Image (cartoon, grey):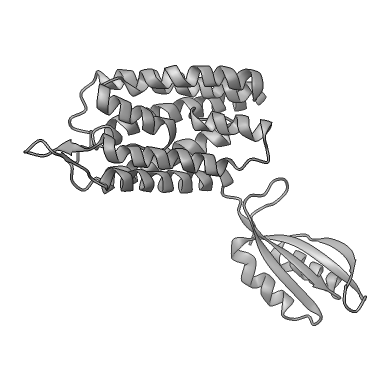
Amino acid sequence: MKVFKKLSAYLFVILAAILLAFTYQLFIVKNNFAPAGINGIATMIQYKTGFSIGYMSLIINVPLCLLAYFFVNRDFAKKSLLFCLVYSFVYLGLQQMEFTGFQYDAGGHDTIYPVIISGTLGGLVYGMCARHNASTGGTDIISKYISIKKPYLNFFWITLTLNAIVAVVSFFVYSKPDTSGNMTYDYKPVCLCIIYCFISTFLGNIIIQGSKQAYKFTVITTHADEISSEVLQKLRHGATKLSAVGAYKKEAKDVLICVVNKHQIIDFQDILKKYDNTFSFVENVGNTFGNFTKVK
């Protein structure tokens, strides 16, 4: 069972790498915008010099994966290296093939469509890799390293800064001379880069969180036994009871902690309405682990 699970994880990484290579070839390189992170820098270098994204990925990511192998996590490093190798060689192979019938070339117009498609597929790839302890290379490996060495440092700002640099630089990289030879600058590549970052990050986070989202109720009451019994009978969920003392009146209270499915919020609130001396607040739970069955 463990062997099958391990092999399936590597298979998902390979499929994700192939998907990202097709995404770049079909929707990104022909539409004059740079996606997020180091891949965005590689895209602009290919646009200006013709030096392939595939080679650039190997040059940058192989050393980063070696760094991750010794200083981060060996399983993470091996899967990330596998992703980068498959992605690079598949992309290099796709460059030698003709995709006229499939490649989306907006010709400078309506490029919002390829960025939506590529951002969606990119987010799917990032989420798949993260859920299987892998990465797409580049800033993903750097963030993993920094989170271990300096956990207090908020890598969000580093990623945001890098993406902002890519967006600003793309303003100049994708500039073109007009008929008189003067350079004309367009804000479209900047906007497309921002849209790509937003879509891919948003979808990637949803996939990482998984489908086990729920809500946690914290209930302060003098009717803990009655409420927990009703929750168990009607919602098929248990609860954890804690003893507490009110800070103002110094009265003994019970605190119930209960996690329920999203569609059970109203049912839980209806139960609480029956009992006086009850106060509750609810929090969003990004994911659940262990014995938490979707019921009712």
In the image, farthest residue toward the left: 179
Q: Looking at the image, which is closer to me, 33 or 206?
A: 33
Q: Position of residue 98 (x, y in %)?
A: 20, 23
User: Horizontally, is 182 left or right of 257 in the view?
Assistant: left
As drawn, 17 above or below 113: above
Image quadrant in which the C terminus is located: bottom right
User: Where does residue 285 sit, x and y in percent of width and height?
Assistant: 65, 55
Res 228 → quadrant: bottom right
Q: Residue at x 68, y 70 (%)?
A: 268
How many labels, in total?
Answer: 0
User: In this orientation, which residue lies closer to the viewer: 35 or 27?
Assistant: 35
Q: Which residue lies at the image location 78% right of the left edge and 62% below the top edge?
A: 257
Q: Quadrant of residue 144?
A: top right
* Residue at the (40%, 30%) spot, across then down: 39
Q: Which residue occupies 90% across, 79% down?
A: 249
Q: Position of residue 187 (x, y in %)?
A: 27, 47
Nearer-the-camera pick, 115 or 274: 115
Q: Is residue 236 left or right of residue 134?
A: right
Q: Quadrant of the N terminus?
A: top right
Residue 267: percent from the left, percent from the top?
Answer: 65, 71
Looking at the image, residue 51 lies above or below residue 172 = above
Q: Is residue 144 visible from the viewing direction of this image? A: yes
Q: Would residue 19 be visible to someone looking at this image?
A: no
Q: Is residue 257 above or below residue 112?
A: below
- Residue 18 is drawn in which quadrant? top left
